Image (cartoon, rainbow, N blue to C red):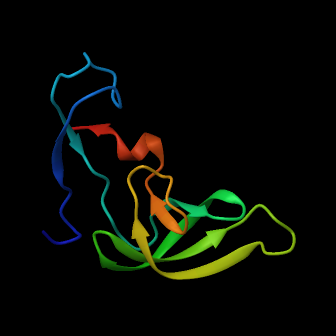
Amino acid sequence: MDNMTPAIEFTTGDPLPNKAGTPKIVKKPHLAIGRIVRFVDPGTGIAPAIITKVWSPECVNLIVFFDSDSVPVGRWTSVLYNASGSGPSTWHWPRDEAEVKA
């Protein structure tokens, strides 16, 4: 699958408002340069970031915007996707975009 085509996946559980255990079709957001994502920084937590290059559906380059006077902006390369949003130095979609009903 190329990075221009949204993926359709089947999920169960409570991420979207629906009966628990009922399959739902979730349309993933379009992965492209300029999209806003969240970056998990091991030291400061979650920060907004903009995609500057797409290597694959799971790997991108980012410009990260930290809420800090000492390091307001950082450039990260080859950052891997982590849907759980918990892995250090990974990226994930903001919750409102990651769970858009098809």
Image point 79% across, 75% down: which residue?
71
Left-right relation of 90 to 3: right
Name the foreground residue: 39 vs 37. 39
Q: Dividing the image into 4 quarters, which one contains the C terminus?
A: top left
Image point 40% across, 76% down: which residue?
60
Image point 41% across, 74% down: which residue?
33
Q: Where residue 84 appears, x then y in whole percent? A: 42, 49
Left-right relation of 30 to 91: left
Does 43 appear above or below 79? above
Does 81 appear above or below 14? below
Q: Dividing the image into 4 quarters, which one contains the N terminus?
A: bottom left
Q: Quadrant of residue 31?
A: bottom left
- Across the whole image, how many numbered discs are drawn on residues? 0
The residue at the far right in this view is 69
Q: Where residue 12 appears, x then y in whole percent? A: 22, 31
Q: Where residue 49 appears, x then y in whole percent? A: 56, 66
Q: Quadrant of residue 101?
A: top left
Does 42 appear above or below 46? below
Q: Where residue 94 appears, x then y in whole percent? A: 48, 49
Name the foreground residue: 72 vs 91. 91
Does 59 appear above or below 13? below
Left-right relation of 84 to 88: left
Image point 16% across, 48% down: which residue?
8
